[in-house]
Amino acid sequence: MNASYEDGGLPELEREISVALIDHCRLSAETVTSINEAKDAMKLTFAEAAVHLGFITMNEAQQAIAWVQSTRSKSNDSLIEAAVRRLQGNQNLILRPDELVKPSASLILAHDMDHARSEQLRALRTQLLLLSTQERHGTIIALLSPGNREGRSQLAAELAISFSQLGRRTLLVDGDLRNPHQHVLFNADNQWGLAQAMAFDEHPRVYGVEGSPNLSLLTSGASVPNPLELLSGGGFERLMSKWRLKYEFVIIDTPPISEYADGLAIATMAGRVLVLCRGQTTHQQQMKDMLKRLATTQAQVLGAVISYF
């Protein structure tokens, strides 16, 4: 009698699914090591461990299993079905919803690739790519500006879209826990997000984005009384470590530096910063003050953008 998948009697099937996931999801060697460690410690399959750690979604795991099924004979269909049932039925997994959100009309790059602004964003993307060629792990970039209404959230969203359009696995994070805006730009629910993931040390709820299969969105979540403490704590640092392994680019929106120190805490951990000001609006002294404070974080300033949008 053949051993069942649940009994661990199908190492070849497990190996094929693992290889499919590593290839399909572009998992790095460090990520694979983390998954294998969790797999052995928790008695899970490779796919279950990857979902549990948040490196892949349930949908991605099922796609890999489906691909393996397409390469195997019909006689193995029952074994594949067992793999799917085990993956879906494991109550120990913390799953990421695969709900898609839709970019608003204001995010021109998502709707009109030929628009003049789209071309400008691609030029900026190229410059940032040239500055990120030496990165061993994923590149995290925090967007900072002195004040309100300077286009920080808009640029963060469009940069994330731009990187994803190159086929790069990209995460857009709303790190503005004071006056968040990314959920508005993507028509997303914002009851559970970054703040709750840090406060309760739980897996964050990440959205897929319609029309951008390589882009994921993490909203800020409902307001909390201690945003700076959360962003300065170990929970945020642990999340960043996972993001570096899972994504090629992580773009983080932040609150205005002139009002809050949150952006400085984010910049310290991100290590790379893109500063933004609005033409004919942002005062020169505000920029000088921001750069002076930013120097204390030792984060690398990749460049400055003057927005007229």
Image (cartoon, rainbow, N blue to C red):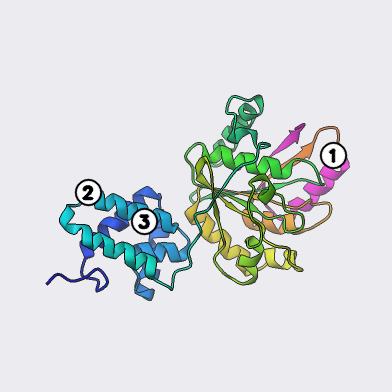
Give the SS element for disc 1.
Answer: loop
Instruction: Indicate which disc, 2 or 1, sits on the residue closer to the N terminus.
Output: 2
Viewport quadrant of the N terminus: bottom left
Q: Quadrant of residue 37?
A: bottom left
The residue that label 3 is drawn on is: 62
Instruction: Indicate which disc, 3 or 2, sits on the residue closer to the N terminus.
Output: 3
Instruction: Indicate which disc, 3 or 1, sits on the residue closer to the N terminus.
Output: 3
**Which of the pair 147/45 is nearer the observer?**
45
Q: Is residue 180 above or below residue 239?
A: above
Please provide the residue range marked out in magenta.
285-309
Identify the residue at image location x=62%, y=69%: 234
**Which of the pair 119/275 is nearer the observer?**
119
Disc 3 residue type (three-letter): Gln
Q: Measure the C-alpha gap from mark 3 to mark 1.
A: 49 Å
Q: Position of residue 109 (x, y in %)?
A: 61, 33
**Which of the pair 307/66 is nearer the observer?**
66
Q: Is residue 267 above or below residue 214?
A: below
Q: Would you say residue 299 sits in the magenta stretch? A: yes
- Mark number displayed over residue 282: 1
Identify the residue at image location x=52%, y=60%: 242
- Mark number displayed over residue 71: 2
Residue found farthest to the left: 1
Disc 2 residue type (three-letter): Thr
Q: Would you say residue 78 sits in the magenta stretch? A: no
